[in-house]
Image (cartoon, rainbow, N blue to C red):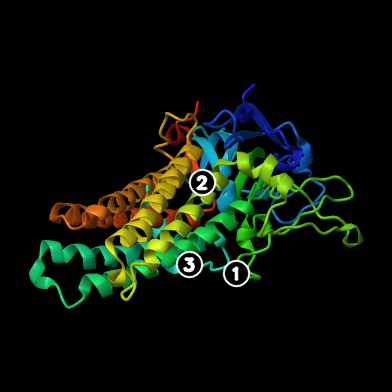
């Protein structure tokens, strides 16, 4: 059996404590057979009454609450089937995806939020980008840092490429000073973003997080439906913790009576029975590194990005005026152009792995997944930066100089597009998608 079709470590099996969520074992898979699974599907077990106990064990709308609804509320629709889709990328980003089959049948058992892939909901998501600033959310920080870095690289590309297209616009030392300083700033910002990206990958939520509140709703003549709505207050991802800039994931406990809080997978223990657990790590143990992280596509992609950015930073430093113009051609090739080639190659590996992480098969693009498009645009940007470095040693040739600068130009724009989509993704914590959108069976 391929390694990617099962969770081999109990401590890393997502949603293992959610007794009312049934893992669909035939939907546990990944694109690379010898690496960890990257996605799994769960169905809600309507026959499990533990999560819908009427004894008022819960008052937060996560399973023990019964509400009366004579009709659908604004922003809701009916669905005949609902699946919770766990994916390694969504888990890392603090997202909770639902795959639904919308239905006009009034007897459909579920009441769900509107799908988030419509034009109206997309516009709301874009609006959140200019109105919400969750600085404590590391995924938001990663996205905005890379957006800032990409903007700097776009400016750099204009300063370097425009004088070649319109020589009359060039001002004194535009390429050396303007291009050199912006290259250093852009490379430094990318390095900072890559550090946060790697830390994000180390702090995935190992137990998984459902992130939705479920209620029994009485509709019409006492007909029972199940209302599903976002429940960010009970999310166990560290992204919701405002206590410090990178967050500390809250550790939920299991109650003494054994009941389960569906939104967190666990319920509260009495105060004297609570135990502490490590919720934020800076460095993994050697055992975890070997057994889990080195088999995790998201971690490998983040590691490749970090290594690439670190090497690429060398070329950012050597681009500075007073350094770049003082080196011989051989030295320039060795510590300016070569780091661009090697660093850009790391970006290519990273973008490719991020795309693979979202795919069901290594050869099938995941057109309906935001993360795939982020990886795709970052891959295009990586090719641009690598091509610039590859043409660099022939910079004395006007054609090579033109194409190298042009590669930086379109590469920086590709990075900016990918970063903006990642920014949008970081604020969409509860996506609701149809089965056809995700191309799921």
- The answer to whether residue 236 is left or right of residue 336 is right
- Quarter in which the N terminus is drawn: top right
Question: Which residue is labeled 2 in the image?
Answer: 301
Q: Quadrant of residue 155?
A: bottom left
- Give SS at disc 2: helix
Residue projecting furthest to the left? 168
**Secondary structure at numbered mark 3:** loop
Q: Residue at x 31, y 74 (%)?
A: 321
Q: Earlier in the sequence, mark 2 or mark 3?
A: 3
The residue drawn where x is 15% and y is 66% is 163
User: Residue 239: x and y, percent?
Assistant: 60, 59
What separation in Å lies between label 1 and label 3 (alpha carbons)? 15 Å
**Is residue 311 positioned above or below 132 on the image?**
above
Q: Is mark 1 on a helix, strand or loop?
A: loop
Within 10 Å of disc 3 (Cα), the crowding (few <14, some 14-19, many 20+) is few
Camera-near label (1 vs 3) is 1
User: Callout 2: few (<14), some (14-19), or many (20+) C-alpha neighbours within 10 Å?
Assistant: many
Left/right placement of residue 275 relative to residue 336 reads: right
What crowding class fits label 1: few (fewer than 14 Cα within 10 Å), some (14-19), or many (20 or more)? some
- Nearer to the camera, 121 or 139: 139
Seen from the viewer's position, the closer of residues 23 and 346 is: 346
Q: How far apart are marks 2 and 1 (CA)?
A: 23 Å
């Amino acid at each position: 059996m391929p390694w990617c079709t099962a969770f081999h470590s109990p401590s890393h099996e997502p949603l293992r404590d959610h007794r009312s969520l049934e893992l669909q074992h035939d939907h546990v898979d990944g694109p690379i057979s010898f690496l960890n699974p990257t996605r799994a599907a769960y169905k809600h077990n309507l026959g499990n009454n533990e999560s819908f106990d009427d004894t008022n064990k819960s008052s937060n709308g996560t399973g023990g609450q019964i509400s009366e609804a004579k009709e659908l509320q604004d922003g809701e629709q009916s669905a005949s089937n609902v699946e919770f889709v766990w994916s390694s990328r969504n888990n890392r980003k603090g997202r909770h995806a639902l795959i639904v089959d919308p239905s006009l049948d009034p007897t459909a058992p579920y009441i769900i939020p509107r799908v988030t892939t419509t034009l109206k909901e997309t516009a709301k998501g874009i609006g959140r980008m200019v109105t919400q600033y969750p600085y404590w959310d590391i995924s938001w920080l990663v996205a905005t840092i890379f957006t800032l870095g990409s903007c700097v690289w776009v400016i750099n590309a204009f300063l370097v490429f425009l004088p070649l297209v319109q020589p009359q616009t060039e001002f004194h030392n535009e390429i050396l000073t303007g291009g050199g300083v912006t290259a250093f700033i852009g490379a430094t910002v990318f390095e900072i973003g890559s550090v946060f990206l790697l830390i994000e990958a180390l702090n995935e939520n190992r137990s998984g997080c459902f992130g939705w509140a479920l209620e029994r709703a009485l509709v019409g003549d006492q007909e029972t439906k199940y209302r599903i709505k976002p429940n960010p207050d009970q999310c166990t991802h560290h992204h919701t913790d405002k206590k410090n800039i990178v967050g500390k994931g809250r550790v939920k406990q299991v109650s003494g009576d054994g009941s389960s809080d569906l939104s967190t997978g666990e319920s509260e223990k009495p105060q004297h029975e609570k135990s502490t657990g490590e919720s934020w790590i800076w460095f993994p143990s050697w055992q975890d590194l070997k057994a889990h992280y080195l088999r995790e596509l998201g971690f490998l992609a983040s590691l490749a990005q970090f290594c690439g950015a670190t090497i690429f930073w060398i070329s950012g430093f050597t681009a500075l005026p007073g350094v770049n113009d003082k080196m011989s051609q051989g030295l320039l090739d060795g510590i300016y152009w070569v780091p661009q080639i090697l660093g850009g190659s790391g970006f290519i590996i990273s973008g490719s792995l991020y795309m693979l992480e979202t795919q069901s098969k290594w050869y099938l693009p995941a057109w309906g997944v935001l993360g795939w498009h982020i990886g795709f645009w970052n891959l295009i940007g990586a090719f641009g930066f690598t091509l610039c470095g590859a043409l660099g040693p022939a910079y004395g040739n006007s054609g090579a100089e033109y194409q190298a600068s042009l590669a930086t130009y379109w590469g920086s724009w590709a990075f900016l597009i990918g970063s903006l989509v990642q920014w949008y993704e970081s604020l969409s914590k509860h996506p609701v998608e149809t089965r056809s959108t995700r191309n799921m069976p």
